[in-house]
Image (cartoon, rainbow, N blue to C red):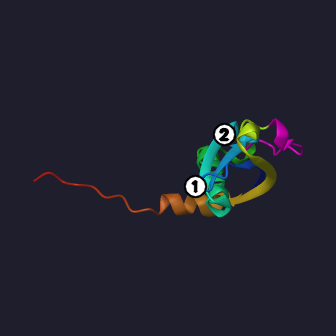
Amino acid sequence: MTMVYPVIITQTNDEKNTCLVEIPDLNGMTEGYGMADAIRMSRDYIGCSLYDKAENEYPKASANFDPAKGRFADAGKSIVTLVDIDMDVYKRKLNSKAVRKNAGI
């Protein structure tokens, strides 16, 4: 199932090109270095937040957000964009990661 959530991304214009991200529908925050990393981190936050939930428990995406009212509005220029995630693919990806176990000898 593909989900789409609006996020507010605030560019701080510091030396690392930090972008602060607010995900209002999930009451979440993350950050990335540059816009592409911020969107990747947003997608990961959404995936981790929804990972253990059933599809009928996923919060509905809101329609309207004012970037000027975001948590990081005073830190720089803010925009609202949409971030999508295919939860089936995300869950398969997390479930297929190898787990290393050390055995004491």
Q: Position of residue 1 (x, y in %)?
A: 72, 59
Residue 2 appears in the picture as rendered: no
The quadrant in which residue 57 appears is top right
The quadrant in which residue 69 appears is top right
Q: Is residue 65 magenta?
A: yes
Considering the numbered disc 1 on the image, is that residue within a helix, a strand or a loop?
loop
Residue that mark 2 sits on = 28
**Who is closer to the viewer here, 17 or 23?**
17
Q: Position of residue 26 (x, y in %)?
A: 70, 40
The quadrant in which residue 93 appears is bottom right
**Who is closer to the viewer here, 48 or 55?**
48
Upstream in sequence: badge 1 or badge 2: 1
* Residue at the spot 74% in from the left edge and 37% down from the top edge: 74
Dot 2, how many residues are within 10 Å of its Cα: few (below 14), some (14-19), or many (20+)? some
As drawn, 59 above or below 91: above
As drawn, 29 above or below 83: above
Residue that mark 1 sits on = 15
What range is drawn magenta here?
Answer: 58-69
